[in-house]
Image (cartoon, rainbow, N blue to C red):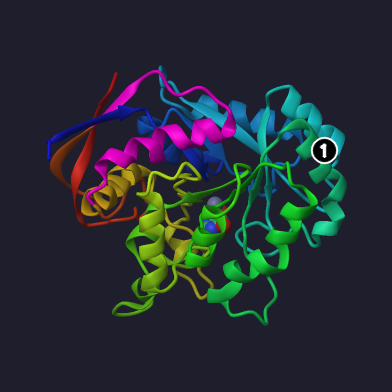
Amino acid sequence: MSDRFTLIAPDDWHVHLRDGAMLENVVTHTARVFRRAIVMPNLSPPVITWAAAEAYRERILRALPSGEQFTPLMTAYLTDSTDPDDLEQGFKRGVFTAAKLYPANATTNSAAGVRDLDNIGAVLSCMQRIGMPLLIHGEVTDPDVDIFDREAEFINRHLRSLRQRFPELRVVFEHITTEQAVDYVGSADQGLAATITPHHLHINRNSMFSGGLRSDFYCLPVAKRERHRLALRRAATSGDPRFFLGTDSAPHSRAAKETSCGCAGIFNAPHALESYALVFDEEGAMDQLEGFASLHGPRFYGLPLNSTQVTLERRDHLVPEIINGLVPFHAADVLPWRVRSSC
Ligand code: DOR
Ligand code: ZN
């Protein structure tokens, strides 16, 4: 195996860049490697209108180091009362790339999310008509459903019927964590894809409880049993174009992670590509990394491939315990690959 691996520059199809001081601290890490990113809208208050998304995009661009070639792709946060005309206008103006469905109270800042899919029928039919992708946080919020079953239950209760009602709607099932999701997406037609995070390829649910309560490994959807992690690794490294890279890097301050009700989210942006590379290397599938990281996503979104390249170098790299006051994924681990340069 060669000590260098060059690929078309990748994109991150799911990231939380936050806002204010935190935005400046995290966007640099994403922009170092990824040329574009789908930016999540779950700010407080959420990014609902195209005008709010345009203003947020400006703040992201201003937070970038000068000369950085990075394009934030903005998303709309769907609510029960989203205006289809605003959504359509935002999409046609090139402000919105997609819209995000958070079931109300499923995760961080999702209280204003969708309470009932029947409330957004007109929005979904508009999105289907104009070809605007729907990105789904696929978990039911019913407290009677075990947290480890919420993703699989979402497929059965909502996703199948949604796709029957809107067969032409382009859907991304975000940050999948179960073999049920892998099987569902893997047997679907061209209109459905899924993103997979680096952390769900590395950790299973034991990691959250190893030697104590480990909030750094708590995210939503929560990591599942080992067999699910292995199914995700098979899907990511399979070469199937329906699976592509989305880090779900979701930073929270130490104080917000380490409290009696700690926030969900793993900050993986500083070493995301290196983290994926380790998985593909371990699976003997480095030849599939470029498809997953750089080809499948743009093809699903109907966007051109990036024209630059990124080189990974086999070189041990100690991940710091803290980066910009945040604990990164793989903190204190040695990763065997490091991104060398973009040209
Ligand atoms: O772990 C997560 N963190 N999952 C989400 O869905 C949201 C995210 C966040 O914004 O912190
Ligand atoms: Zn997310």
User: In the picture shown, does residue 23 fall above or below 78?
Assistant: above
Residues 56 and 200: in front is 200
Inspect the magenta stretch and tell me whether residue 310 lies in it.
yes
Query: What residue is pinned by disc 1?
Result: 126
Where does the N terminus fall, quadrant-wise? top left
Establish whether ligand 2 lies closer than 8 Å to the Cβ of label 1.
Answer: no
Picture coordinates of residue 88, whole percent (x, y): 80, 31
337 horizontally vs 71: left or right: left
Image: magenta residue range: 284-311
User: In the picture shown, does residue 156 fall above or below 233?
Assistant: below
Q: Which residue is drawn at 67% across and 39% down?
A: 133
| Residue type marked 1 | Cys
Picture coordinates of residue 104, whole percent (x, y): 72, 62
Label 1 environment density (alpha carbons within 10 Å; few <14, some 14–19, many ≥20):
some
Asked whether the viewer can see residue 206, the reply is yes
Residues 83 and 109: in front is 83
